[in-house]
Amino acid sequence: MKIIQNPIELKEILRKEKKSIGFVPTMGALHKGHLSLIKRAVSENDITVVSIFVNPTQFLPGEDFEKYPRKIEADKRLCEIAGVDYLFAPTSDDIYQDDEVLIKAPKIKGYILEGFNRPGHFDGVLQIVNKLLNIVKPTRAYFGKKDAQQLYLIEKMVKNFYLDVQIVPCDIVREDDGLAMSSRNVYLSPKDRQKALLISKSLKRASKLIMDGKRDVKELKDEMKKVLKDLDVEYIEIVDRDFNKIDKIEKNNSIILVAAKVGGTRLIDNIWV
Ligand code: PAF
């Protein structure tokens, strides 16, 4: 596995590789969720590139940019074992210049839910993902469904900017007890980790009700609220796969999303129904 810090160097090396390229962008502190994306990329492409970059522009002032877990040595070993060919690990100075051309997330879909609670977050995500896609020029890029709105907006950017890449959505990976894998789970105390299980439980409750034939969104949200009553909930929302609000569940076209704070840690989770 080659480790490369300089974007131009990586770009030049990859241009010479006349093969399919799978790309997994990450902010590091790799867990089983990332590894499932990496494994899929390795199995579906000739070459796999993983990036590790804690992107400052997607964190709001006061968020956890400084304390975001950084485990570069462990990450390198995991990537090597998983069969990654190139690990791209730039610094901010390698990636960002002064007074850049900026990308704005769409005014509506970029400023609801996550975008409402973290205004400007998706501008930063799209800025970095656009750069990464242009550096790597992958055949396929792999993103987790856990960041459902991020995935939606990246697909939209690819479409709006006519980018030549296939975005591959990947299923959420959970701990045995249901907690969705996240690099931020390390912030949770044992007590908070137990409380955090209410999030996946609320989603399971909604999914059970849907299996029992319930379709009314208000009714489902009310039931979820009951499960989540001890958490500091930011939103419980049910949207279609284009992130439009809906009144009734549309089978195979709906996403149920939750964001809540447990202790000081903000967690998100969702299910696609
Ligand atoms: O999902 C993430 O880890 C990040 O938002 C991403 C896509 C790597 C951009 O920094």
Image (tube, helix red, strand yellow):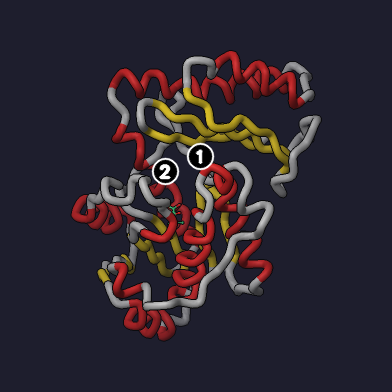
Q: Is ligand 1 within 8 Å of the beta carbon of the residue shown at mark 2?
A: no
Q: Nearer the viewer, residue 196 or 253?
A: 196
Q: Quadrant of the C terminus?
A: top right
Give left or right: position of 34 versus 189.
Answer: right
Please tell me how many numbered marks the rendered image carries.
Answer: 2
User: Alpha-carbon neighbours of circle 1 within 10 Å: few (<14), some, or many (≥20)?
Assistant: many
Placement of 3 over or under 81, stated as above or below: below
Q: Secondary structure at mark 1?
A: loop
What is the x, y in percent for residue 112? Answer: 63, 46
Q: Would residue 156 appear left or right of 259 to someone viewing this image?
A: right
Name the kind of residue labelled 1 in the image.
Ile
Residue 261 lies in quadrant: top left
Q: Are marks 1 and 2 in contact (CB under 8 Å)?
A: yes
Q: Amino acid at mark 2?
A: Gly
Q: Residue 239 at x, y = what percent?
A: 71, 39
* Residue ID at (53%, 51%): 119
Can you identify the residue that label 2 sits on? 33
The image quarter in which residue 15 lies:
bottom left
Question: What is the spatial separation of the Cα atoms under label 1 and label 2, in whole angstroms?
Answer: 7 Å
Q: Which residue appears at 45% of the width and 34% of the height?
A: 267
Instruction: Report the residue at 29% width, 21% height from top.
Output: 190
Q: Is residue 253 something that shows in the picture? A: no
Quadrant containing ligand 1 reads: bottom left
Which of the marked residues, 1 or 2, is nearer the chain's N terminus? 2
Image coordinates for residue 99, horizontal then vertical, percent: 42, 77
Above/below status of 161 relative to 215: below
- Residue drawn 51% across the image and 69% down it: 130
Q: Above or below — where is 117 with respect to 165?
A: above
Q: Which mark is residue 172?
A: 1
